[in-house]
Structures are given as C-alpha cells and as structure tokens.
C-alpha cells in the first residue's frame, strides 16, 4: 500500500497491484482484516461488517492519471483531519505512509499504472 488511514467505521487506502487478477483476493483480505480490527473495538460485533457492494457501502476503483493520483493520495492522507480527530495528519496514529507521494507517482509513471481509458462515471454526461 502507498498510504492508508483507518477510522472507526471505515478506511481509505491507495495502493498498487501489479497483477489485476489478484484484485478480488487482495480486497477480500484487506476488507476482512480491517473488519476484524474494527469489530474488535466494538461492544456488539457487526456482521457482515462491510455489507454488499450493491448497498454502496464501499468503493474500489482505479486511477486514471497523475492528477487523480495526487488528489486520492491527499484525500487518504487527510482523513483523520477531515474527521476532526486531529489537526495534523501526522498526529493520527492510524494513518500510514508506506511510499511518499512523489516516489509513488514515479513508480506509477514508470510502470504505466494509470488507466486513462477507463470510464469515470462521476464525470460522464
């Protein structure tokens, strides 16, 4: 993972996956691990924690270009601040930066990771 922030009821993460066929198993493991961490803090366990995708409880997507990468990185980094938990992201212990922004961008560009031809529903008319 590049950057991850874990909040009380959800998480945000930005990462790189070299083999697309591994996406499903990777997301199952991440969702399962985070669900366990969160459920371990609750008095009453929630099941299923993440719900179903059709319920709109989570979003997985791809990055199409450098601008979207930069925005997603900052968005993920600032979750603790946005939630009003801390004033500086560096003070939130559940924000983890594994790869700095520019190093991650360099890796993405070098490996042609961006998918500019994938439609983005949000911006389609």
Image: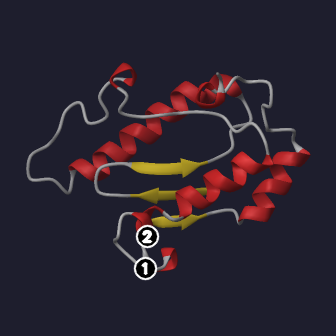
Residue sitting at x 63%, y 63%: 98
Q: Nearer the viewer, residue 76 or 13?
A: 76
Is the image coloured rainbow, by chain, by secondary structure, or in one colour? Answer: secondary structure
Is 61 above or below relative to 36? above
Residue sitting at x 80%, y 55%: 105
Query: Can you give x and y, in whole percent of width and height, for residue 120 in the image?
Result: 65, 28
Is 107 above or below relative to 121? below
Residue sitting at x 55%, y 63%: 77
In this rendering, would 84 be left or right of 45?
A: right
Query: Can you give x and y, in whole percent of width and height, for residue 106 in the image?
Result: 85, 56
Q: Can residue 65 be seen in this snapshot?
A: yes
Q: Which mark is residue 87?
A: 1
Locate the C terminus and report the quarter of the image it occupies.
top right
- The crowding category of the residue bearing disc 1, from other C-alpha atoms within 10 Å (few below 14, some 14 to 19, many at least 20), is few
- The crowding category of the residue bearing disc 2, from other C-alpha atoms within 10 Å (few below 14, some 14 to 19, many at least 20), is some
Q: Nearer the viewer, residue 40 or 65?
A: 65
Query: Can you give x and y, in whole percent of width and height, for residue 95 in the image?
Result: 48, 66
In this rendering, would 122 be left or right of 116?
A: left
Direction front: furthest residue: 125
* Dot placed on the residue nearer the N-terminal end, 1 or 2: 2
Q: Which residue has dot 2 on it?
A: 81
Task: Give the SS element for disc 1.
Answer: loop
Is 22 above or below relative to 80? above
Would you identify the image quadrant in which residue 17 lies?
Answer: top right
Q: Can residue 1 be seen in this snapshot?
A: no
Residue sitting at x 53%, y 50%: 13
What is the distance, in whole Å, between disc 1 and disc 2 at their CAs? 5 Å
In this rendering, would 110 be left or right of 10?
A: right
Query: Can you give x and y, in whole percent of width and height, for residue 112 in the image?
Result: 87, 38
Tags 1 and 2 in contact by the CB under 8 Å rule?
A: yes
The total of numbered circles placed on residues is 2
Task: Give the SS element for disc 2.
Answer: helix
């Amino acid at each position: 993972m590049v950057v991850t922030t874990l909040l009380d009821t959800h998480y945000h993460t930005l990462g790189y996956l070299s083999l697309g066929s591994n996406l499903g198993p990777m997301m199952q493991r991440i969702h399962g691990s985070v669900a366990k961490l969160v459920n371990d803090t609750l008095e009453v366990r929630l099941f299923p924690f993440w719900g179903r995708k059709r319920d709109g409880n989570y979003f997985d997507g791809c990055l199409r270009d450098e601008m979207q990468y930069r925005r997603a990185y900052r968005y993920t980094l600032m979750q603790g601040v946005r939630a009003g938990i801390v004033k500086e992201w560096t003070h939130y212990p559940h924000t983890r930066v594994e790869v700095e922004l520019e190093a991650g961008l360099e890796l993405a560009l070098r490996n042609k990771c961006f998918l500019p031809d994938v439609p983005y529903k949000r911006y389609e008319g």
